[in-house]
Amino acid sequence: MNVPNLITVGRLVAVPVVIVMMLFLDDSSPRVFYNKLLSLFSALFFALAMSSDMIDGYLARKYNLQTIFGKFMDPLADKMLFIAAMIMMIEIGRIPAWLVALFFIREVAVTSIRAIAASDGIVVSASNWGKYKSAFVSSATVGLMLHYPFLGINWKLIGWVLLLPSFLLSVGSGLAYAIMVYRKIMVMRDDTSHSSA
């Protein structure tokens, strides 16, 4: 297993770590300092894990280390990480369940389309729109995880402001991905039918 794939695996391992860290968050607790500290550490750990996506992608492209495993697991690790963080914020009231459900449905739909494409021998890497979506969603999630004002910045407000473009990019990139996969499948099937004619 090459270095980019190991970084991807590390991001997968980060998922349960984030869940465990966020299990102890309680915005109604009188121990505000403890909750602020845990929010800060959880957000920083999440941001570090998500930023590793840029590193493994850069290494894979620069040294030609792109693999089938990386193409599938790299975007899946990102999805699992931010969805897990969002789910953990439902109980403490930092994000509504219906919004998390919409993000979750989008990710399941895209993953299903990717699996359908793979059954036809088509592997499609994440598009630029998907990368923009990931950047916005990650930033919004960090803001909501921080929750409290740090360095005089209203991180909760920033998180909510970034959620709208995050959702729009999620829907748009999902549709673009579906259309791209559909076209590739049609082209491949046309080529197959012509070669067998």
Image: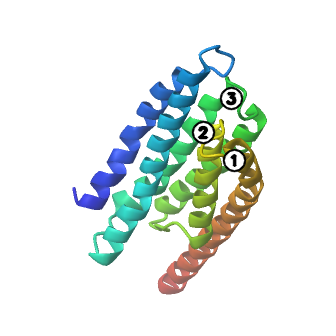
Q: Label 3 crowding class (10 Å Cα cut-off): few <14, some 14-19, many 20+?
A: some
Q: Residue at x 28, y 70 (%)?
A: 65
Local secondary structure at mark 3 = helix
Report if the CB atoms under discs 3 and 2 are less than 8 Å apart: no
Residue at the front extreme of this rendering: 152
Image position, residue 70 (x, y; %): 37, 59
Q: Label 3, on which residue?
A: 90
Element assignment for label 1: helix
Q: Amino acid at mark 2?
A: Leu
Q: Nearer the viewer, residue 65 or 49?
A: 49
Task: Name the image quarter holding residue 162.
Answer: bottom right
Q: Amino acid at mark 3?
A: Ile
Can you give x and y, in whole percent of width and height, for residue 104 in the image? 65, 42
The circle on residue 159 is 1
Question: Residue shown at 69%/57% (left/top)?
Answer: 170
User: Could you tell whether 129 is left or right of 51 in the image?
Assistant: right
Quadrant location of residue 58? bottom left
Residue mark closest to the camera, 3 vs 2: 2
Which class describes the residues within 10 Å of circle 1: few (<14), some (14-19), or many (20+)? many
Q: Where is residue 71 drawn, in percent x and y?
A: 41, 62
Name the residue: 31% across, 77% down.
Answer: 62
Per the image, the residue denoted by label 2 is: 146
Q: What colour scheme governs how the chains and residues are painted in the rendered image of this protein?
A: rainbow
Looking at the image, residue 105 lies above or below residue 137: above
Estimate the spatial distance between the alpha carbons at disc 3 and disc 1, rounded to whole Å: 14 Å
Q: Is the N terminus in the top left, top right, bottom left or bottom right quadrant?
A: bottom left
Instruction: Tell me which numbered mark, 3 or 2, is placed earlier along the sequence.
Output: 3
Of residues 5 and 46, the one drawn nearer to the viewer in this rendering: 46
